[in-house]
Amino acid sequence: MERKKASDFPQELWALFDQYQHGGIDRRAFLDGAQKFAVGGLTATALFEMMRPNYALAAQVPPNDSRIKTQRVTVPSPNGNGNISGLLAMPANASAATKLPVVLVIHENRGLNPYIEDVARRFAVANFVALAPDGTTSVGGYPGDDEKGAEAFGKVDRAKMQEDFVAAAQWLKSRPESNGKLGAVGFCFGGGVVNNLAVRLGADMAAGVPFYGAQPATADVAKIKAPINAQFGELDQRINAGWPAYDTALTAAKVPHEGHIYKAANHGFHNDTTPRYDKAAAEESWRHTLNWFNKYMRA
């Protein structure tokens, strides 16, 4: 089946889908709103299915790739939900003698899905140690389906989940393979977590790359010490509205930072399992990500 592109759907429909994805409306309300776009023999349900992720596409780096090694790990989180599980990925030759920079990879608001696991493996190929934790661990973990994942995500205490990510970051930084330089990258919900971790961890975080993530409170930006490289889609006005104030606050706090806004790209443009994927924007933003982490985490 031909892969769909964002431009195959009206932007108004994407705005409606964005509301659904972020809990503003439920599936029924999306289907009711999508009805007017269901033409040419399509149904609203068919549109919904076409716009959802297809995780069969999430395999830029296969799990059995000989260049890397991966394992499932469980990290103690006494201040959070007790523990948080995740996928740890690193180069095949990584050891306590290699001392590599480490990257926390934080998922969207569905839990640790195959796309985010693949991103962790991509970092391993790029010579980083990466941990992709699952914020839904305390309710059974990502259930293999995004709608059920959204339900699971909604059941987790948000403050405790934040503590889980802090615990995962500290555990990863102290790994024997780590050179002591911790970076964090996150997507959508995870982008917001990156910004909040930068506030929370201060100088304990070496660099952050939030993808279309909610910005922290302006009053908290002065606590940030990690250089920030923010990625945005031009059409994602909901998130982009917060960037100018964040940019100004980072400048005032003398935090090295960049903001990249990709022309005609939607929220979620890096996720290569959905029609919102924008190949040019995804590839350019990935270059910025690797360059940023290499610059601030390998010295």
Image (cartoon, grey):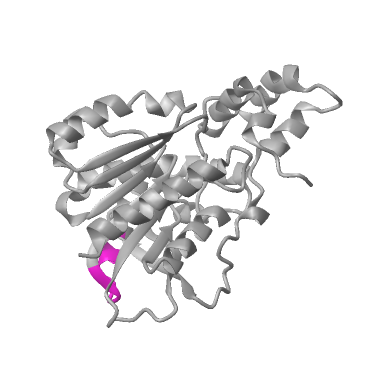
Q: Quadrant of the C terminus?
A: bottom left
Determine the image quadrant of residue 79: bottom left
Q: Tell me if residue 173 is in the magenta stretch.
A: yes
Residue 144: x and y in percent read 62, 54
Q: Tell me if residue 196 is in the magenta stretch.
A: no
The answer to whether one can see residue 157 in this image is no
Residue 212: x and y in percent read 41, 37
Between residue 11 and residue 203, name the one nearer to us.
Answer: 11
Work out whether 111 lies above or below 127. Answer: above
The residue at the point 63 percent across, 49 percent down is 145
Work out whether 27 lies above or below 111. Answer: above
Between residue 134 and residue 226, name the one nearer to us.
Answer: 226
Question: Is residue 32 left or right of 200 when viewed as pictured?
Answer: right
The residue at the point 23 percent across, 63 percent down is 181
Q: How many marks?
A: 0
The answer to whether one can see residue 247 in this image is yes
The residue at the point 60 percent across, 45 percent down is 146
Residue sticking out furthest to the right: 41
Between residue 264 and residue 249, name the one nearer to us.
Answer: 264
Question: Is residue 266 left or right of 133 when viewed as pictured?
Answer: right
Question: Is residue 201 left or right of 98 when viewed as pictured?
Answer: left
Residue 128: x and y in percent read 36, 67
The residue at the point 36 percent across, 65 percent down is 75
Work out whether 192 lies above or below 296. Answer: above
Residue 291: x and y in percent read 33, 55
Question: Which stretch appears magenta?
Answer: 169-179
Question: Is residue 155 left or right of 274 when viewed as pictured?
Answer: left
